[in-house]
Amino acid sequence: MTSYAEPRIGHDGFTHILVVCDGDRDGDEAALKLAVTAIDVAQCDGRAVPHVDVLCVIEPEPGEDFIRTLGGASPERLEATRHKERSASIARSISAAGLPDTTPLKIVSGKGFVEIIRHAMAASADLVIKPAAKVGGLHAQIFGSKDLHLLRKCPCPVWIVRPFPDGDAAQALSGTPVVVAAVDFDRDAEGAGDTP
C-alpha cells in the first residue's frame, strides 16, 4: 500500500497539480489552461511555482479489443497505437495551453478513476484538474458517472472542468466560469479538534 501525505494547502498555495487529459482537445486545453493560471497566480503572489504533471488514462470500451483482435491486431499493438495517438494529441494541447514542452506526460491503461487516484497519491498531488467526462448511455445510467467516483474517493481536491463551446451565451454574459465546491466539515473539524 502506498503511503499518502495529506496535502497542505494554505498560504503557500498548491505545490503539485495533476492534470488529467482524455484526448478531447477542448476539454484538455481547458484543464491545462487552469494549470497555467495556477502557475501565473503563484508567480504574481511571489510563491513557489506548482509542479504540473499530465496524466492520460486509456480505458478501452467493452468489446473493443476483442473486435480489433478479430481483425488481426495483437493486444500489444492495439495498446501501442492508442498510446501513440493520445500522446500526439495531448502534446499539441499542452503546447496550445502554454505549458512547456517538457511538462511530464504519462499515459496509462486501466480504470479511469482508479488510475487517477493512484497517480495523485504517488505524486502527493494537492489538486487534480480534469475535464468533465462525457456521460451517456445505459452504462452511465446504471453505474453512474466516472467523475462522481473520482470526486467521492480522491484524497485531494478535484476540479472538474466543463469547456464552453465558442459563442456560448452564458459564458459571454458572465465572463467568469461557474465553480461548485464541496467541503467536508467533519474532516476539517476533526483535524482542528472541534468535534466532541
Image (tube, grey):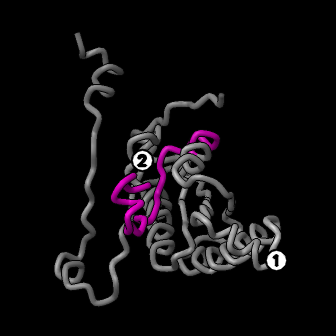
Q: Position of residue 92 (x, y in %)?
A: 62, 80
On-image quarter of the N terminus: top right
**Residue 97 is covered by the magenta coloring:** no
Q: In the rendered view, would you say 155 is above or below 25? A: above
Q: Is residue 75 visible?
A: yes
For label 1, count other residues whose C-alpha is less than 10 Å away and answer few (under 14), some (14-19) or many (20+): few
Looking at the image, which residue sits at the far bottom?
A: 167
The answer to which quarter of the image holds residue 189 is top left
* Rendered residue at 59%/71% (across/down): 99
Real-space Cα separation, disc 2 to disc 1, in angstroms? 35 Å
Q: Which residue is mark 2?
A: 149
Which stretch is magenta?
Answer: 120-146
Identify residue for label 1: 72
Q: Nearer the viewer, residue 71 or 177?
A: 71
Residue found at the far left of this picture: 173
Front tag of 2 and 1: 1
Above or below 69: residue 42: above
Q: Secondary structure at mark 2?
A: helix
